Image (tube, coloured by chain):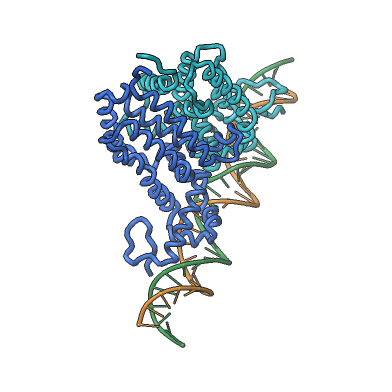
Chain colours: A cyan, B blue, C green, D orange
DNA sequence: AAATAATTTGACCAATTGGTCAGGATCAGC
DNA sequence: GCTGATCCTGACCAATTGGTCAAATTATTT
C-alpha cells in the first residue's frame, strides 16, 4: 500500500514498474506541457502519449499540478548546471565561451524541457516566481559579481553583468524555444549538430568580440 | 443584418459600437492568450475581461480560432515593422543600433502582443508556420543579403547574417517574453523606461562592438 | 413614432475536463 | 501453490468547455 509520492523520498524503494512508469509519464507530460502549457494540456493527452490510461496516470501523480511541478523541478537542475560552472578563477573568455557552449548543448538536447520552462515564465511564472526571486536571484547576484570583477580588472569591457547574462540566456535558449521559427526562416527541416556548431561560432564571435577589450590589431 | 466579419473588408461600414467592442475583445483576448496560450484560454475569460457576455463575444467573432487569428495578425505588422526599416544604403552601425532600439521599444510597448507571438511559436507555430516559411523567410533572406553585403565590403566582421538576426530577435524579445524572470532576478517590480535605456546601451555595446571590425584603439 | 437593423443575453447543449472509486489483474516473496 | 501488496481499468461524476438560439433590448433610419 505504498502510494508513490514523487516529490519526497520514498519510504519504500521504487519498484521497477514504478520507476519505468513515472519516467514514461514525466516524459509524456513534458512534451504535452511544452506543446500546450499547463492549462492547455490535458491528463488524457498525457496518458495517451505515455501509453496508459488516465486513472493510471493519476495513480502515480494524484493531481495535474503535481505532475507539472515534477516536470518543472527536474528541469531546473539541468537548466542551471552550466551557470553554476562559471568559474571566478578561470579566464573570462574561456569561461564565457564554455558557458555559451553548454547552454547551446542544453538547448539542443533538452528542447522540450526548455520549452516547458519558457512557457512557465511566459505565462507569468505562477509556480516558479518565488524560486526566481529567491534562489535564482542570489545565484545570479553571485555570478554578476564574478563578471563585475572581470570588468574591474580590465579583462572585460564595461557592461552591465545582468544584461550580459540575459543576453546569453536569450541567445542560446532561442534555438530551443523558437526553433520552429528558426527552421522555417532558414528553410531547414531541423537544426543539426553541425548547425549548432555554426551557431556557437557566430554567438561566441559576436559576444566575445564585443566583450573583450580592444587592442591594436 | 450585417454580421460583423472581422478579417475582410466590411460591406457595411463599422458602427461605433462595433469598432469599440471589437477593440475591447481583441485587447482582452490578447491578454488571455498571452497568459494561457490558445488552448488554455477560454472564451468566458476573454468575455469577462472585455466586460461582456460570452455570447456577445461570439457575436463579433464566431469562433475562438477566428479571435486567435485576428489577435495574431494585428501583431504581425507591428512585430515586423522595425525589421523592414533596415536600410541597405545606411551605415551598418547606425542601422543596427536603430533596429535594436526599435525592437526594444516594441518589447516595452507591446509586451502582451509579443507574448502571444512567442507562445504561438513555442507551441510549434501551428497557425503561423506557413507564414514563417514563406513571407518571413523571403524577408529575412533579403535582409541577410544586406548584412552579407556589409560584411563583404568590410564594414562588419564575418558572421552568419541569419544568426545575427536571431541574436537580435532573441536578445530584444527576451525583455518582453521573459520579463517575469528578468524582474525577479533583478529584484525589480517592473522594467522602467530608464531600465530599457540601460538595456539598449548594454546590447548595443556588446553586439556592435562585436560586429565592427577591430582597428587600433 | 414606427419600422428596421444592430446588439445583447439567459438558457441551453453536447463534448471535454480533472478526478474518484470499487474491483480486477498482476506481481513479489513465501 | 498461497498471500498480500502493487498496479491497472471501466464506469462514473461534477464542473467547465466552445458554441447556439430565440427572444429581448437598444440604435438608427424613415
Decide which of A187, B107 is in the foreground and name it: B107
Q: Is residue A79 above or below residue B114?
A: above
Q: Say whether residue B178 is visible.
A: yes
Q: Horizontal and vertical percent for residue B109?
A: 47, 45
Q: Quadrant of residue A86?
A: top right
Looking at the image, is C28 positioned above or below residue A180? above
Query: Is the residue B216 above or below the residue A138 in the image?
Result: above
Asked whether A21 or B144 is in front, the reply is B144
- State which quadrant residue C9 falls in: bottom right
Instruction: Indicate the position of residue C15 as horizontal and vertical percent values.
Output: 49, 50
Image position of A209 (left or right of A70): left
Q: Work out which quarter of the rendered image holds the C terminus of chain B and state it.
A: top left
What is the x, y in percent for residue A35?
47, 36
Mark yes or no: residue A59 visible: no
- Residue occupying image coordinates x 50% and y 12%: A91
Q: Give the quarter of the figure containing the N terminus of chain B.
A: bottom left
Q: Position of residue B201 (x, y in %)?
A: 46, 32
Which residue is rendered at x = 66% and y = 28% of the image? Answer: A7
Amino acid at each position: 500500500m505504498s502510494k508513490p509520492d514523487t516529490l519526497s523520498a520514498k519510504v519504500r524503494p521504487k519498484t521497477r514498474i514504478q520507476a519505468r512508469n513515472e519516467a514514461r509519464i514525466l516524459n509524456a507530460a513534458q512534451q504535452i506541457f511544452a506543446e500546450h502549457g499547463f492549462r492547455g494540456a490535458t491528463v488524457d493527452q498525457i496518458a495517451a502519449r505515455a501509453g496508459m490510461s488516465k486513472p493510471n496516470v493519476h495513480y502515480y501523480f494524484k493531481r495535474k499540478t503535481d505532475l507539472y511541478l515534477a516536470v518543472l523541478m527536474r528541469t531546473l537542475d539541468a537548466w542551471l548546471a552550466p551557470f553554476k560552472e562559471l568559474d571566478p578563477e578561470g579566464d573570462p573568455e574561456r569561461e564565457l565561451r564554455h558557458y555559451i557552449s553548454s547552454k547551446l548543448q542544453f538547448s539542443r538536447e533538452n528542447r522540450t524541457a526548455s520549452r516547458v520552462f519558457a512557457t512557465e515564465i511566459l505565462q507569468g511564472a505562477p509556480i516558479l516566481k518565488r524560486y526566481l526571486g529567491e534562489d535564482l536571484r542570489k545565484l545570479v547576484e553571485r555570478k554578476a559579481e564574478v563578471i563585475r570583477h572581470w570588468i574591474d580588472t580590465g579583462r572585460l569591457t564595461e557592461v552591465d553583468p545582468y544584461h550580459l547574462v540575459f543576453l546569453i540566456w536569450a541567445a542560446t535558449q532561442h534555438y530551443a524555444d523558437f526553433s520552429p521559427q528558426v527552421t522555417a526562416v532558414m528553410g531547414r527541416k531541423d537544426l543539426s549538430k553541425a548547425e549548432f556548431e555554426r551557431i556557437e561560432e557566430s554567438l561566441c564571435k559576436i559576444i566575445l568580440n564585443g566583450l573583450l577589450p580592444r587592442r591594436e590589431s
